[in-house]
Each structure stands twice: as C-alpha cells, then as structure tokens.
Image: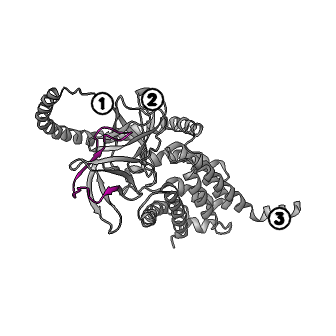
Amino acid sequence: MIHYLRQIWDRFRDFIVTGFLLLFSLFIITKSESPSVNSFKTFVFGTFSFATSFVSNVILMTDLRSENEELRRKTAELMLEVNSLREYGIENESYKQMLQLKDTSTLSLVTSKIIAKSFSPAQGTITLDKGSNDGIMVGMPVINGNGLIGIVHSVSSAFSIVRTLRNVHLKLIIRNERSRSEGILKWTGEYLTVTNLPKTADVKHGDRIVTSDISSVINKPLFVGRVAKIINPESGYFNDLIISPGVDFNSIKSVFVVKTTQFPLNTLPQTNERGEQ
Amino acid sequence: MKTGWFYPLLIFFPLLLIQIVVIPLISLDGFVPNLPLIALVFFTLKNGRLFGAVSGFVYGLLIDLIIGSLIGSTMFSFTAAGFTAGLFFNENKIENYLRSYVFILILFLSSLVHEVLIFVILSFGAEGDAFTGIIRQSIYASLYTSLIGSAVIILFPGRKFF
C-alpha cells in the first residue's frame, strides 16, 4: 500500500502539490475579510510601503515641475469658478437664514500622494502615503480636483489602501444631479456603470452623476462622472448607464482624503441591503 | 542551469518595487506589464513546474499582502500561471527557450492564465457582459507583458530570436 502511494506521489507530485496550493488559495480567499487576516495584511503593506514611499518620492521629484505648471493652470480656472460660485453662496446663505438651517458639514481634506498602484486592471487599488497617524480611517472618501476616486479600505499607521471606483467590490449609491434619480454605481471590470435605474427616470447623455446623500458611505454630493451611454434593454423595468468618470485613473498622482464627522466607519465597509458598501 | 529557490525570492522584492512605483509611468490605458510574472516564467523555465507552482504561490501571496488586493486572488492566479509555464519545462531545451520567441509565447500563455483567473475571481458576481471584457482585457494585458518580456531574449546571452 505504502509502495503504491509512493508511486502515485512520485508520478503526480507536481499535480498534487499544485492542486493543494490552488485549493489553499481558494480557502484563503474565503477568509480574506476576517479581522486577523486584515491586520496581518495591514502590517505587511505598511512595512513594505516605507520602501515604496522612498522610491516614489525620488521619482516624483523629477515630475514636480510639470505638475506645478498644471496646478497653476488649475488654480486660475478654480479662481474663476469660485468667483461665480461665491455669488450663489451669498444667495444660498440668505435662503438658509430665511429657513433657519444650520450648515452641519465639517469637511476637511488631507493631502496625500499615491505611492503605489495595483498592476492588474481588475484589482483597482492605490496606496497612499498617509495613515491613521494623519487621521485617515477606513471608509473615508478619496477625491481629487476632478471628482471621486474611491474609498479608504485599510489603514496602517503611516499608509492606507484605497479601493478606487475601478474595483469590482466597490458599490455606491449615486444620483443624477439634474433629475435627482438614483441608482447603484459599480465597476464591471470594463466600464463604470449605473444599474437599477427605472426606465421612467429622466436621464440624458452628459448628465452629471454625483454621490447620493442617502448613501451610508458618502453622504455628500461628490462628483463621479457624466453619463456617456444609456443602455435601454427592451425587456425589464430598468435601464443601465455607462459613466465616463471625471477622474483619469491612469494619471492621478496626488489625492485628498475627505474627513467628515460622519466618517470613519469603525469597521471594514459592510454591504447594506441595497448592495452598497 | 537551475537557479535554486533563494535567488528568485531575492529578486522579487526589487522587481515588485519597480512594478508598483515605476511601471505605472508606462501604462497604456491602464494596462501595465507584469514584471513579477515575467520573472516567474523565466525562473520556472529554468527549474520546472513544481518550482513554478510553489514560486507562483509565494509571489502571489506577497503581492496580495503588499498591494492590498483580495488576499488569495493573486496567489491562485500566479500558482496556475507558474504551473502553466512549468508544463513547458525541458531540461535539454532551457537555453533554447530563453533565447527565442518561444519564451514570449510561453509568457503570453502564462500571463493569459493569470489575467483570466484574476479577472474571474475579482469580477465574481459582477453583472453585465463580463466574459467579453475579461477576454479582451486579459489579452491586452498579456500582450503588453509579453512585449516587455521580450527584453529577456534581447538581454539573454547568445540570443537567436527565431
């Protein structure tokens, strides 16, 4: 019997070991969100990120000049935009006083650099050079001047990992800014889409899509993108939209983490009854 | 000539550092070549399929931990990709493979296995026409990895492309 087993082992050793490793990997996937695995992952990426951060800083130094030029141009554009928004602000303030409303938002931004990006298009994560020491916590939204980038997924003392909108596990409730119709935003692996949008919803090509204030994760209207295509299947009650994101995920280098009193979530993002994180 | 286990592990960390810091600068529409996979295929062709599977598993584990993706996903896809590359292992043809276009073909195949598996794992439950997207994106990513991997042939001493 032992001789027989030995023969099988000698003959199929590579296949047996590979099969075991594949099964073990699948087992690990099922345990991937457990707290112990997450804390170990946080420790490892936090340690390696020191090396990543150092190399990244050296490389980014060479890129600073062009980025400065771009920022100057952006500042000028924003100044023009602020001027026009200021008038609306004054008008809005007077309406608020009339309605006796208080502005309860306590938004503040933490500037951060991207020190690493995932290298498979399906993974959709970025590593930031700021962590819990800077007040970053799980669940905080990450933006840049062009809109929402993603949500902080795990945090070590000095670094954090963000799930971008190009991560298939990130789902958010969004709103059409013009018509106020709501749907669920997700990444299919190829496109950013909005699903579960009733056929009766008023949607037009080019409409601005923002995060919805009924979202349990981001309850501020952060710009996500514009409607690029309306998919109108003949059957069913819903339409799907393809969204052109405001952010160019290939070129982002620095971001802002939005800190509000509502955030952070104290645990890892959970899926609610609407399928949103 | 076989390399043993230590050298591939040693080279992995600087490669991963380059991969996550430098390589994004040459991304094409979000696609980047996969340097750890190129190294995995290279060392597997020198050491055999068991080496490929085990190294793929270790490489995948470290990648999952370091870049923060779903832990187990790259472990699975790299193990399968390493084993796939190992299927072409032939002690008498190591040098021939590493000096010719055969390396690129094996790299492309292994990369395709990795990309398809990781897309399937990470897109599990995603709605829509996922299949077309998976195939298309996997092919693009594999082509780019193979293109960069052709540098191995160029840098390998005594090359003969065809």
Q: Chain of mark 1?
A: A
Q: Between A141 and B73, which is closer to the camera in this rendering? A: A141
Q: Does the magenta portion include A31?
A: no
Question: Share a chain, discs 2 and 3?
Answer: yes
Q: Does the magenta portion include A215?
A: yes
Q: Element type at marker 2?
A: helix
**Residue at image x 12%, y 28%?**
A94
- Give the residue number, with chain letter if any, for mark 1: A107
Q: CA distance from mark 2 to mark 1?
A: 17 Å
Q: Earlier in the sequence, mark 2 or mark 1?
A: 1
Q: Which residues are magenta?
A: A193-222
From the viewer's perspective, tell me whether residue A56 is left or right of residue A67. Answer: right
Q: Which quadrant, please, contains the N terminus of chain A?
A: bottom right
* Total marks in image: 3
Residue B83 pos. (x, y %): 63, 61
Q: Mark 1: which amino acid?
A: Leu
Q: Main secondary structure of the magenta part?
A: loop
Q: Earlier in the sequence, mark 2 or mark 3?
A: 3
Q: Are marks 3 and 1 in contact (CB under 8 Å)?
A: no
From the viewer's perspective, tell me whether residue B96 is left or right of residue B135. Answer: right
Q: Which quadrant, please, contains the C terminus of chain A?
A: top left
The quarter of the displayed image where residue B137 is located: bottom left
- Give the residue number, with chain letter if any, for mark 3: A7
- Give the residue number, with chain letter if any, for mark 2: A132
